[in-house]
Image (tube, rainbow, N blue to C red):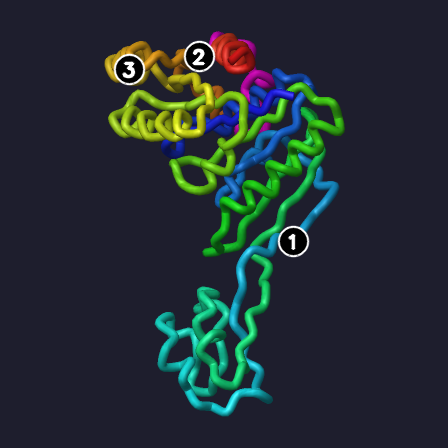
């Protein structure tokens, strides 16, 4: 099994659109993982039918037992998040789960209880199994949730003797990205011909190198600013990074997304040939 992650230093580069096309090109030889748990949208293009649903618990919230509390108000004074009322009742929305009140309460009246931070799912799609998740609003530990679903994806791929594990990674360079990158065999960095695109390409490439992950670059919508695209190509050449391919700007991306289809299943134009070229290079890293 080859473990592969599609990433981008910033959002909006077309990473998920390409991942869906890669899933179609893999022809059911892959298990898919949507690692962008804060804003999961691979399911919009792959048409999943959920077969399993699991709760994700990764944080705690304080709760004060009234039968033990003597209303000393020490917790009220020390809570810097203003999560405790004068009646010594915890507001679960304001509570950050830091546990300070638990440690300072002289009566031992504070309990730290696990709370549901989101859900994760296993679904069937026309392109193979998809493991995806939905993190709750304002919840944390997205890196931990990415690790949970990625590990489950690996188990499914191994059990099904699949050739690929394809992870649609989150944008940026933070903890969820690290969770989607560590231990994979190859990464595809999807960038765009803008100043911020080049900057974020440099940042995410540094992360790949830190974890010793072989990476290639795809320039999406390269023909919107060919001078910037040339700068990216020059940068890749100078850094010894494979350029997996360049993809033209085309409205069929939007049309395919509206229909809930990967681009390579919707149209057989020049853009599809460009995506196939990128996939062949990425799969061969």
Estimate the spatial distance between the alpha carbons at disc 3 and disc 2, rounded to whole Å: 14 Å
Query: Residue 153: x and y, percent?
Result: 65, 34
Whether residues under marks 3 and 1 lie with C-beta atoms below 8 angstroms apart, the answer is no
How packed mark 1 is, by other alpha carbons closer than 10 Å (few <14, some 14-19, many 20 or more), is some
Q: From what the image shows, is residue 219 above or below residue 36?
A: above
Q: Secondary structure at mark 3?
A: helix
Q: Which residue is mark 1?
A: 55
Q: Which residues are magenta?
A: 256-271
Q: Residue 229: tell me if it is visible.
A: no
Examine the structure image and report whether residue 203 is included in the region drawn in magenta.
Answer: no
Q: Residue at x 49, y 43 (%)?
A: 39
Q: Which residue is mark 3?
A: 235
Q: From what the image shows, is residue 96 above or below residue 170?
A: below
Q: Earlier in the sequence, mark 3 or mark 1?
A: 1
Whether residues under marks 3 and 2 lie with C-beta atoms below 8 angstroms apart, the answer is no
Q: Which residue is mark 2?
A: 244
Examine the structure image and report whether residue 262 is included in the region drawn in magenta.
Answer: yes
Estimate the spatial distance between the alpha carbons at disc 3 and disc 1, rounded to whole Å: 44 Å
Residue 259, disc: none
């Amino acid at each position: 099994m080859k473990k592969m992650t599609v990433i981008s230093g910033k959002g909006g580069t077309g990473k998920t659109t390409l991942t869906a096309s890669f899933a179609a090109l893999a022809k059911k030889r892959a298990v898919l993982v949507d690692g962008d748990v804060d804003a999961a949208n691979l399911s919009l293009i792959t048409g999943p039918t959920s077969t399993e649903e699991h709760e994700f618990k990764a944080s705690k919230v304080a709760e004060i037992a009234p039968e033990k509390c003597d209303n000393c108000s020490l917790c009220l004074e020390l809570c810097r998040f203003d999560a405790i009322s004068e009646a010594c009742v915890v507001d679960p929305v304001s509570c950050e789960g830091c546990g300070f009140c638990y440690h300072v309460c002289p009566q031992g009246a504070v309990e730290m209880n696990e709370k549901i931070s989101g859900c994760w799912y296993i679904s069937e799609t026309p392109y193979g199994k998809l493991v995806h998740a939905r993190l709750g609003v304002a919840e944390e530990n997205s890196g931990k949730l990415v690790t949970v679903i990625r590990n489950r994806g690996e188990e499914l791929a191994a059990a099904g003797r699949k050739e690929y594990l394809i992870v649609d990674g989150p944008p940026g360079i933070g903890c969820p990205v690290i969770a989607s990158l560590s231990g994979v065999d190859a990464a595809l960095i999807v960038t765009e011909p803008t100043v911020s695109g080049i900057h974020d390409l440099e940042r995410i490439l540094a992360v790949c190198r830190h974890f010793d992950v072989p990476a290639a670059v795809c320039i999406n919508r390269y023909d919107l600013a060919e001078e910037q695209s040339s700068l990216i190509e020059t940068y890749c050449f100078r850094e010894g990074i494979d350029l997996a391919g360049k993809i033209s700007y085309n409205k069929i991306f939007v049309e395919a997304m509206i229909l809930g289809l990967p681009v390579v299943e919707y149209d057989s134009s020049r853009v599809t040939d460009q995506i196939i070229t990128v996939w062949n290079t990425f799969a061969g890293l």
